[in-house]
Image (tube, rainbow, N blue to C red):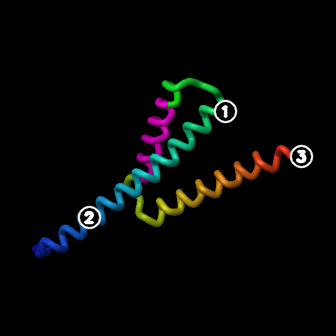
């Protein structure tokens, strides 16, 4: 029998809501960055940007919606390292 008090139920609910918000924000930022990079490289318009943003958002949400916190943080860390490496390549590549 489940005998959680109201305070314990609220605590678990708020932690779940916060976790889903973190996952959504992570997927939002990654998909926005990928869509912006794709728009800059290919040079397409606003409607294609919106379509690619929604496509990246749905793909990322499909990957991370059932993931735990550690997996989401690892995905974020890998993405940040990749973005920094690309930024360094663009910045230092002009000098060579």
- Mark with earlier residue (2, 1): 2
- The magenta stretch spans residue 11: no
Q: Is residue 12 above or below residue 29?
A: below
Which segment did they paint magenta?
A: 50-64
- The magenta stretch spans residue 62: yes
Residue placed farthest to the right in the image? 96
For label 3, the crowd category at 10 Å Cα-Cα, with few meaning under 14, some 14 to 19 and many 20 or more, is few
Res. 67 image quadrant: bottom left
Judging from the image, what secondary structure is the residue with disc 1 in? helix
- Give the CA separation, mark 2 to mark 1: 40 Å
Residue found at x 59% / y 54%: 79
Q: Which mark is residue 96?
A: 3
Point out residue 9 in the picture as x, y percentages from the top left corner.
18, 69
- Mark with earlier residue (1, 3): 1
- Give the CA separation, mark 2 to mark 3: 52 Å
- Mark with earlier residue (2, 3): 2
Task: Say which residue label 2 marks.
Answer: 14
- Seen from the viewer's position, the closer of residues 92 and 71 is 92
Point out residue 73 in the picture as x, y percentages from the top left corner.
50, 62
Q: Is residue 21 above or below residue 59?
A: below
**Do residues under tags 2 and 3 come within 8 Å of each other at their CB atoms?**
no
Residue found at x 45% / y 42%: 57
Task: Say which residue label 1 marks.
Answer: 41
- Horizontal side, residue 4 vs residue 96: left or right: left
Magenta stretch prevailing secondary structure: helix
Judging from the image, what secondary structure is the residue with disc 3 in? loop
Point out residue 52 in the picture as x, y percentages from the top left corner.
51, 33
């Amino acid at each position: 029998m489940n005998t959680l008090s109201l305070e314990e139920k609220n605590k678990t609910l708020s932690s779940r809501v916060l976790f889903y918000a973190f996952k959504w924000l992570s997927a939002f930022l990654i998909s926005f960055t990928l869509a912006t990079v794709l728009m800059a490289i290919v040079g397409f318009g606003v409607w294609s940007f919106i379509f690619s943003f929604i496509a990246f958002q749905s793909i990322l949400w499909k990957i991370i919606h059932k993931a735990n916190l550690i997996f989401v943080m690892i995905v974020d860390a890998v993405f940040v390292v990749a973005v920094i490496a690309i930024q360094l390549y663009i910045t230092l590549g002009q000098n060579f």
